[in-house]
Amino acid sequence: MFGFITKSLSKTVDAIKSVAPKKKIFFTKDELEDILLEADVEYALVEIIIEQTYQEKITREILRSKLLATLAYTSYKEPEFTAPFVELIVGVNGAGKTTTISKLAQKYKNEGKKVILGAGDTFRAAAIEQLTLWSKKLDIPIVSSKQGHDSSAVAYDTIDSAKSKGFDNVIIDTAGRLHTQTNLANELKKIHRICDKAHPGSPHRTVLILDGTQGNSAIAQAKAFNEMIGIDGIIITKLDGTAKGGSVFSIAYALELPILYIGTGEQADDLVVFDKYEFVDGLLDAIFIEEE
Protein backbone atom coordinates (compact mmCIF):
# COMPACT_ATOMS: atom_id res chain seq x y z
CA MET A 1 0.00 0.00 0.00
CA PHE A 2 1.50 3.24 -1.14
CA GLY A 3 -0.54 6.26 -0.11
CA PHE A 4 -2.85 7.89 2.39
CA ILE A 5 -5.96 6.60 0.64
CA THR A 6 -4.81 2.99 0.60
CA LYS A 7 -3.68 3.27 4.23
CA SER A 8 -7.21 4.36 5.12
CA LEU A 9 -8.47 1.08 3.65
CA SER A 10 -6.60 -1.10 6.12
CA LYS A 11 -9.70 -2.18 8.06
CA THR A 12 -11.57 -2.89 4.85
CA VAL A 13 -8.65 -5.02 3.68
CA ASP A 14 -8.72 -6.91 6.99
CA ALA A 15 -12.43 -7.61 6.45
CA ILE A 16 -11.78 -8.90 2.93
CA LYS A 17 -9.10 -11.25 4.26
CA SER A 18 -11.73 -12.93 6.44
CA VAL A 19 -13.35 -14.31 3.25
CA ALA A 20 -10.28 -14.30 0.98
CA PRO A 21 -7.29 -15.03 3.21
CA LYS A 22 -4.97 -15.88 0.31
CA LYS A 23 -4.15 -13.74 -2.70
CA LYS A 24 -4.88 -15.40 -6.03
CA ILE A 25 -4.42 -14.77 -9.75
CA PHE A 26 -8.17 -15.04 -10.34
CA PHE A 27 -11.43 -15.60 -8.45
CA THR A 28 -14.74 -17.20 -9.35
CA LYS A 29 -17.91 -15.14 -9.42
CA ASP A 30 -19.10 -16.59 -6.13
CA GLU A 31 -15.79 -15.79 -4.47
CA LEU A 32 -15.84 -12.27 -5.90
CA GLU A 33 -19.38 -11.72 -4.65
CA ASP A 34 -18.33 -12.64 -1.11
CA ILE A 35 -15.32 -10.32 -1.28
CA LEU A 36 -17.29 -7.29 -2.51
CA LEU A 37 -20.10 -7.79 -0.01
CA GLU A 38 -17.60 -8.11 2.84
CA ALA A 39 -16.13 -4.76 1.79
CA ASP A 40 -19.66 -3.29 2.05
CA VAL A 41 -20.28 -2.78 -1.64
CA GLU A 42 -24.08 -2.57 -1.94
CA TYR A 43 -25.68 -5.86 -2.98
CA ALA A 44 -27.44 -4.40 -6.03
CA LEU A 45 -24.14 -3.02 -7.33
CA VAL A 46 -22.36 -6.32 -6.66
CA GLU A 47 -25.00 -8.05 -8.79
CA ILE A 48 -24.45 -5.54 -11.62
CA ILE A 49 -20.69 -6.08 -11.50
CA ILE A 50 -21.11 -9.87 -11.49
CA GLU A 51 -23.69 -9.89 -14.29
CA GLN A 52 -21.50 -7.70 -16.51
CA THR A 53 -18.51 -9.98 -15.99
CA TYR A 54 -18.82 -12.76 -18.53
CA GLN A 55 -15.57 -14.56 -17.78
CA GLU A 56 -15.66 -17.41 -15.30
CA LYS A 57 -12.16 -16.61 -14.06
CA ILE A 58 -12.09 -13.00 -12.92
CA THR A 59 -8.63 -11.49 -12.98
CA ARG A 60 -7.34 -8.27 -11.47
CA GLU A 61 -7.62 -6.34 -14.76
CA ILE A 62 -11.20 -7.47 -15.35
CA LEU A 63 -12.32 -6.44 -11.86
CA ARG A 64 -10.28 -3.23 -12.02
CA SER A 65 -12.15 -2.06 -15.13
CA LYS A 66 -15.52 -2.83 -13.52
CA LEU A 67 -14.71 -1.01 -10.29
CA LEU A 68 -13.33 2.03 -12.10
CA ALA A 69 -16.54 2.18 -14.15
CA THR A 70 -18.56 2.62 -10.94
CA LEU A 71 -16.40 5.67 -10.17
CA ALA A 72 -16.94 7.31 -13.57
CA TYR A 73 -18.50 10.44 -12.06
CA THR A 74 -15.96 11.05 -9.32
CA SER A 75 -13.85 13.63 -11.18
CA TYR A 76 -14.49 17.29 -10.44
CA LYS A 77 -14.09 20.46 -12.47
CA GLU A 78 -13.97 23.72 -10.56
CA PRO A 79 -16.55 26.24 -11.82
CA GLU A 80 -15.66 29.67 -13.07
CA PHE A 81 -15.97 32.24 -10.30
CA THR A 82 -15.06 35.69 -9.10
CA ALA A 83 -13.13 35.64 -5.83
CA PRO A 84 -13.76 34.86 -3.09
CA PHE A 85 -14.57 31.20 -3.68
CA VAL A 86 -17.52 30.40 -1.42
CA GLU A 87 -18.17 26.87 -0.16
CA LEU A 88 -21.20 25.72 1.77
CA ILE A 89 -20.58 22.64 3.91
CA VAL A 90 -23.60 20.45 4.66
CA GLY A 91 -24.21 17.13 6.38
CA VAL A 92 -25.82 15.58 9.42
CA ASN A 93 -24.49 16.18 12.91
CA GLY A 94 -21.70 13.79 13.78
CA ALA A 95 -20.51 13.27 10.20
CA GLY A 96 -17.37 15.30 10.85
CA LYS A 97 -18.35 18.66 9.34
CA THR A 98 -16.42 20.84 11.78
CA THR A 99 -13.24 18.80 11.55
CA THR A 100 -13.49 18.65 7.76
CA ILE A 101 -13.95 22.41 7.53
CA SER A 102 -10.76 22.85 9.53
CA LYS A 103 -8.94 20.45 7.19
CA LEU A 104 -10.12 22.34 4.12
CA ALA A 105 -9.10 25.62 5.71
CA GLN A 106 -5.64 24.25 6.51
CA LYS A 107 -5.29 22.96 2.95
CA TYR A 108 -6.10 26.36 1.47
CA LYS A 109 -3.83 28.11 3.94
CA ASN A 110 -0.98 25.77 2.99
CA GLU A 111 -1.57 26.84 -0.61
CA GLY A 112 -1.00 30.45 0.39
CA LYS A 113 -4.65 31.48 0.28
CA LYS A 114 -6.45 33.76 2.72
CA VAL A 115 -9.32 31.88 4.32
CA ILE A 116 -12.25 32.94 6.47
CA LEU A 117 -14.79 30.69 8.22
CA GLY A 118 -18.49 31.24 8.84
CA ALA A 119 -20.09 29.49 11.84
CA GLY A 120 -23.45 29.02 10.17
CA ASP A 121 -24.64 26.18 12.41
CA THR A 122 -26.29 28.55 14.87
CA PHE A 123 -28.60 25.84 16.17
CA ARG A 124 -25.88 24.17 18.22
CA ALA A 125 -23.71 26.15 20.59
CA ALA A 126 -21.17 23.32 20.49
CA ALA A 127 -20.78 23.72 16.72
CA ILE A 128 -19.95 27.41 17.10
CA GLU A 129 -17.51 26.69 19.91
CA GLN A 130 -15.76 23.85 18.06
CA LEU A 131 -15.29 25.87 14.88
CA THR A 132 -14.06 28.85 16.89
CA LEU A 133 -11.47 26.65 18.61
CA TRP A 134 -10.26 25.39 15.24
CA SER A 135 -10.05 28.95 13.88
CA LYS A 136 -7.82 29.93 16.78
CA LYS A 137 -5.67 26.81 16.42
CA LEU A 138 -5.18 27.42 12.69
CA ASP A 139 -4.95 31.20 13.06
CA ILE A 140 -7.80 31.72 10.60
CA PRO A 141 -10.51 34.38 11.14
CA ILE A 142 -14.12 33.40 11.79
CA VAL A 143 -17.49 35.14 11.70
CA SER A 144 -19.92 33.84 14.28
CA SER A 145 -22.91 34.79 16.41
CA LYS A 146 -24.76 33.36 19.37
CA GLN A 147 -26.81 30.18 19.33
CA GLY A 148 -30.24 30.74 17.82
CA HIS A 149 -29.26 33.69 15.64
CA ASP A 150 -29.99 33.77 11.91
CA SER A 151 -27.54 31.48 10.13
CA SER A 152 -28.15 33.28 6.82
CA ALA A 153 -26.99 36.53 8.41
CA VAL A 154 -23.75 34.79 9.42
CA ALA A 155 -23.27 33.62 5.84
CA TYR A 156 -23.87 37.13 4.49
CA ASP A 157 -21.53 38.77 7.00
CA THR A 158 -18.79 36.19 6.30
CA ILE A 159 -18.91 36.76 2.55
CA ASP A 160 -19.16 40.53 2.97
CA SER A 161 -16.10 40.52 5.22
CA ALA A 162 -14.19 38.31 2.78
CA LYS A 163 -14.93 40.65 -0.12
CA SER A 164 -13.97 43.80 1.75
CA LYS A 165 -10.72 42.32 3.08
CA GLY A 166 -9.57 40.45 -0.01
CA PHE A 167 -9.96 36.86 1.13
CA ASP A 168 -9.61 34.01 -1.36
CA ASN A 169 -11.78 31.34 0.25
CA VAL A 170 -14.94 31.38 2.34
CA ILE A 171 -16.04 28.18 4.10
CA ILE A 172 -19.48 28.28 5.72
CA ASP A 173 -20.78 25.67 8.14
CA THR A 174 -24.49 24.82 8.24
CA ALA A 175 -26.89 23.05 10.58
CA GLY A 176 -27.05 19.29 10.26
CA ARG A 177 -30.47 18.86 11.74
CA LEU A 178 -33.52 20.99 12.47
CA HIS A 179 -36.84 19.84 13.88
CA THR A 180 -38.00 18.44 10.55
CA GLN A 181 -36.38 17.78 7.18
CA THR A 182 -38.64 20.46 5.69
CA ASN A 183 -37.23 23.03 8.14
CA LEU A 184 -33.69 21.97 7.29
CA ALA A 185 -34.39 22.20 3.56
CA ASN A 186 -35.90 25.67 3.93
CA GLU A 187 -32.97 26.83 6.04
CA LEU A 188 -30.39 25.58 3.54
CA LYS A 189 -32.27 27.09 0.60
CA LYS A 190 -32.39 30.42 2.41
CA ILE A 191 -28.63 30.35 3.01
CA HIS A 192 -28.13 29.61 -0.70
CA ARG A 193 -30.21 32.66 -1.63
CA ILE A 194 -28.41 34.92 0.82
CA CYS A 195 -24.99 33.75 -0.40
CA ASP A 196 -25.98 34.70 -3.93
CA LYS A 197 -27.22 38.07 -2.69
CA ALA A 198 -23.93 38.73 -0.89
CA HIS A 199 -21.79 37.54 -3.80
CA PRO A 200 -23.61 36.75 -7.09
CA GLY A 201 -22.97 33.21 -8.25
CA SER A 202 -22.16 31.87 -4.81
CA PRO A 203 -22.02 29.44 -3.19
CA HIS A 204 -19.67 28.19 -5.87
CA ARG A 205 -19.55 24.73 -4.34
CA THR A 206 -21.89 22.92 -1.97
CA VAL A 207 -20.09 20.02 -0.33
CA LEU A 208 -21.74 17.14 1.50
CA ILE A 209 -19.84 15.48 4.34
CA LEU A 210 -20.56 11.76 4.67
CA ASP A 211 -19.47 9.56 7.55
CA GLY A 212 -17.59 6.60 6.07
CA THR A 213 -18.47 4.40 9.04
CA GLN A 214 -22.14 4.50 7.97
CA GLY A 215 -21.37 2.61 4.80
CA ASN A 216 -24.22 2.28 2.35
CA SER A 217 -26.75 3.83 4.73
CA ALA A 218 -25.17 7.18 3.78
CA ILE A 219 -26.66 6.92 0.29
CA ALA A 220 -30.21 7.79 1.38
CA GLN A 221 -28.85 10.67 3.44
CA ALA A 222 -26.92 11.99 0.45
CA LYS A 223 -29.93 11.74 -1.84
CA ALA A 224 -32.00 13.76 0.63
CA PHE A 225 -29.45 16.60 0.75
CA ASN A 226 -29.07 16.53 -3.02
CA GLU A 227 -32.82 16.92 -3.45
CA MET A 228 -32.89 19.78 -0.94
CA ILE A 229 -30.27 22.06 -2.47
CA GLY A 230 -28.14 20.18 -4.99
CA ILE A 231 -24.71 18.84 -4.08
CA ASP A 232 -21.58 19.59 -6.09
CA GLY A 233 -19.24 17.16 -4.38
CA ILE A 234 -18.74 14.78 -1.48
CA ILE A 235 -16.10 14.40 1.20
CA ILE A 236 -16.05 11.03 2.95
CA THR A 237 -14.76 11.12 6.52
CA LYS A 238 -13.53 8.49 8.98
CA LEU A 239 -12.67 6.01 6.24
CA ASP A 240 -9.61 4.99 8.21
CA GLY A 241 -11.83 3.80 11.07
CA THR A 242 -14.17 1.49 9.18
CA ALA A 243 -14.24 -1.80 7.30
CA LYS A 244 -16.87 -0.35 4.95
CA GLY A 245 -14.54 1.14 2.37
CA GLY A 246 -16.35 -0.61 -0.46
CA SER A 247 -19.36 1.61 0.16
CA VAL A 248 -17.46 4.34 -1.70
CA PHE A 249 -18.24 2.49 -4.94
CA SER A 250 -21.93 2.32 -4.06
CA ILE A 251 -22.09 5.98 -3.06
CA ALA A 252 -20.35 7.16 -6.22
CA TYR A 253 -22.43 4.89 -8.47
CA ALA A 254 -25.78 5.75 -6.89
CA LEU A 255 -25.30 9.51 -6.66
CA GLU A 256 -23.21 10.22 -9.77
CA LEU A 257 -21.43 12.97 -7.83
CA PRO A 258 -17.74 13.80 -7.53
CA ILE A 259 -15.87 12.54 -4.48
CA LEU A 260 -13.55 15.42 -3.68
CA TYR A 261 -11.56 14.28 -0.68
CA ILE A 262 -11.16 11.44 1.80
CA GLY A 263 -10.64 12.09 5.49
CA THR A 264 -7.82 9.87 6.70
CA GLY A 265 -7.44 10.92 10.35
CA GLU A 266 -8.16 13.54 12.99
CA GLN A 267 -5.37 16.04 12.31
CA ALA A 268 -5.79 19.21 10.24
CA ASP A 269 -3.64 17.80 7.44
CA ASP A 270 -5.47 14.46 7.26
CA LEU A 271 -7.41 15.24 4.09
CA VAL A 272 -6.37 13.88 0.70
CA VAL A 273 -7.70 14.35 -2.80
CA PHE A 274 -9.69 11.29 -3.85
CA ASP A 275 -7.80 9.32 -6.49
CA LYS A 276 -9.98 6.59 -7.94
CA TYR A 277 -7.00 4.70 -9.35
CA GLU A 278 -5.19 4.60 -6.01
CA PHE A 279 -8.43 3.65 -4.27
CA VAL A 280 -9.18 0.74 -6.61
CA ASP A 281 -5.59 -0.48 -6.75
CA GLY A 282 -5.34 -0.33 -2.97
CA LEU A 283 -8.17 -2.83 -2.68
CA LEU A 284 -6.96 -5.03 -5.52
CA ASP A 285 -3.46 -5.23 -4.07
CA ALA A 286 -4.99 -6.97 -1.08
CA ILE A 287 -6.79 -9.55 -3.21
CA PHE A 288 -4.71 -10.44 -6.21
CA ILE A 289 -1.23 -11.63 -7.02
CA GLU A 290 0.14 -10.78 -10.43
CA GLU A 291 0.27 -13.42 -13.12
CA GLU A 292 3.74 -14.79 -13.69
Image (spheres, rainbow, N blue to C red):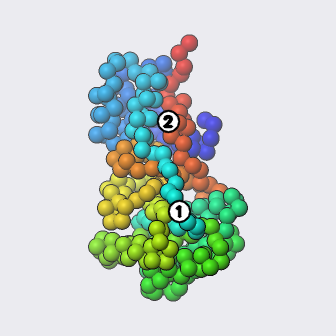
Residue 24 percent location from the top left of the image: 48, 21
Which residue is located at x 45 percent, y 45 percent? 74
Q: Amino acid at mark 2?
A: Val
Could you tell me if residue 10 is visible in this image?
Answer: no
The disc at residue 282 is none
The quarter of the picture where residue 40 lies is top left
Q: Nearer the viewer, residue 209 or 159?
A: 159
Which residue is located at x 49 percent, y 36 percent? 280
Give the residue at mark 1. Answer: 81
Residue 237 percent location from the top left of the image: 51, 55
Measured along the vertical axis of the image, is residue 131 above or below residue 243? below
Could you tell me if residue 253 is visible in this image?
Answer: yes
Q: Nearer the viewer, residue 244 or 290?
A: 290
Which residue is located at x 46 percent, y 74 percent? 195
Q: Secondary structure at mark 2?
A: helix
Q: In terms of sequence position, does the residue under pointer 2 or pointer 1 come before the other? A: 1
The quarter of the picture where residue 270 lies is bottom right
Give the residue at mark 2. Answer: 280
Q: Amino acid at mark 1?
A: Phe
- Badge 2 local density, few (<14 within 10 Å), some, or many (20+)? many
Quadrant into which the N terminus falls: top right
Quadrant into which the C terminus falls: top right
